[in-house]
Image (tube, rainbow, N blue to C red):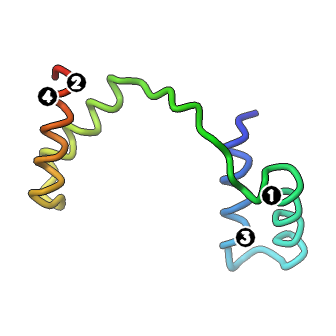
Amino acid sequence: MNPGNVVGGHKANLNNPNTSEESKQHSKEVLDQEFNGGNVESSGDKNPQNVAGGLKATTKNPNVSDEAKQSAEQRLKEMGQ
């Protein structure tokens, strides 16, 4: 089981207005006792093809600022894409 997914589920529960206070208390206890309050380090291993795909999508998205598009283009160039 991926710890990041577990933490994400408990954090979602804490912010869900449809869950009981008892459930929220349980999630808070699990985060505090087992996951350092919800601070989980990521492995940092990202698939370069997925990163490039996301950056390419950013450059073509009309809802993204010009500054973000330029940043994405620069990162793509640095990746050799």
N-terminal label among 1 and 4: 1
Image: 53 above or below 58: above
Report the front residue among 62 and 46: 46
Mark 2 sits on what residue? 79
The structure residue drawn at horizontal position 72% and vertical position 70%, both measured from the top left corner, is: 14
User: Helix, strand or loop at disc 2?
Assistant: loop
N-terminal label among 1 and 3: 3
Report the front residue among 57 and 19: 57
The tally of labels here is 4
The structure residue drawn at horizontal position 19% and vertical position 27%, both measured from the top left corner, is: 78
Residue 20 shown left or right of residue 68 in the figure: right
Residue 2 shown left or right of residue 79 in the figure: right
User: Helix, strand or loop at disc 3?
Assistant: helix
Q: Are marks 1 and 3 in contact (CB under 8 Å)?
A: yes
Mark 1 sits on what residue? 31
Q: What residue type is labelled 4?
A: Lys
The structure residue drawn at horizontal position 59% and vertical position 38%, both measured from the top left corner, is: 42
The span from disc 4 to disc 2 (Cα, nearest Å) is 5 Å
Report the front residue among 51 and 40: 40
* Residue 14 circle label: 3
Question: Disc 3 or disc 4, which is closer to the eye?
Answer: 4
User: Helix, strand or loop at disc 4?
Assistant: helix
The span from disc 2 to disc 1 (Cα, nearest Å) is 37 Å
User: Helix, strand or loop at disc 1?
Assistant: helix
Q: Do the residues labelled 4 and 2 touch (CB within 8 Å)?
A: yes
Mark 4 sits on what residue? 77
Mark 2: give few (<14), some (14-19) or many (20+) Cα within 10 Å: few
Place of residue 67 in the rendered image (x, y in percent of width and height, measured from the top left): 13, 57
* Residue 53 circle label: none
Where does the N terminus fall, quadrant-wise?
Answer: top right
N-terminal label among 3 and 4: 3
Question: In which image quadrant can residue 16 be found?
Answer: bottom right
